[in-house]
Amino acid sequence: MPKKKPYTQMTTAQLRAATRQFDDPNYHPKALPWGEKEKRDQLAAAQLGRSMKVGRPRIGLGAQRIQIAMEAGLRRKVDAYARKHHMTRSRLLSEAVSRHIAA
């Protein structure tokens, strides 16, 4: 069996022939089986009583959005400081509040 060409090197006619199956509305590809890594991750999560959720990991009690009012000039200074120190506005404000409470 000859080796298939990469799609980028096929002619229009070759591409049509190679992708004809995708034009069929009844085409449903089979799901790929999970690999060993995914199985290990699922098992580890199950042993810890967790699910395989996506997204940011929960830190502490988890993050919660709040809305605050801030003078526009101060907000510009906060944003400039955060940008200069390679952090988000949220992280800067969280660290500032934590330090203020600890002091």
Image (cartoon, rainbow, N blue to C red):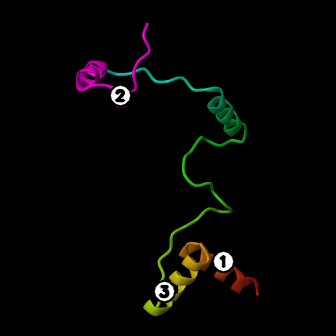
Mark 3 residue type: Arg
**What residue is shown with label 2?**
9
Whichever of labels 3 and 2 marks the residue nearer the N terminus, that label is 2
The residue tagged 3 is 75
Q: Taking 18 as reference, is 101 above or below it? A: below
Residue found at the very far top of the displayed protein? 1
Amino acid at pointer 2? Gln
* Within-10-Å neighbours for mark 2: few <14, some 14–19, many 20+: few
Q: Which is closer to the viewer, label 3 or label 2?
A: 2
Label 1: how many Cα within 10 Å (few below 14, some 14–19, many 20+)? few
- The answer for how far apart the CA atoms under marks 2 and 1 are is 53 Å
Q: What amino acid is labelled 1 in the image? A: Glu
**Residue hosting label 1:** 95
Q: Is residue 17 above or below residue 50?
A: above
Residues under numbered marks 2 and 1 in contact, where contact means CB atoms less than 8 Å apart = no
Q: Nearer the viewer, mark 2 or mark 1?
A: 2
What is the secondary structure assignment of the residue under circle 2? helix
Q: Earlier in the sequence, mark 1 or mark 3?
A: 3
Q: At 42% across and 20% down in the image, what residue appears?
A: 30
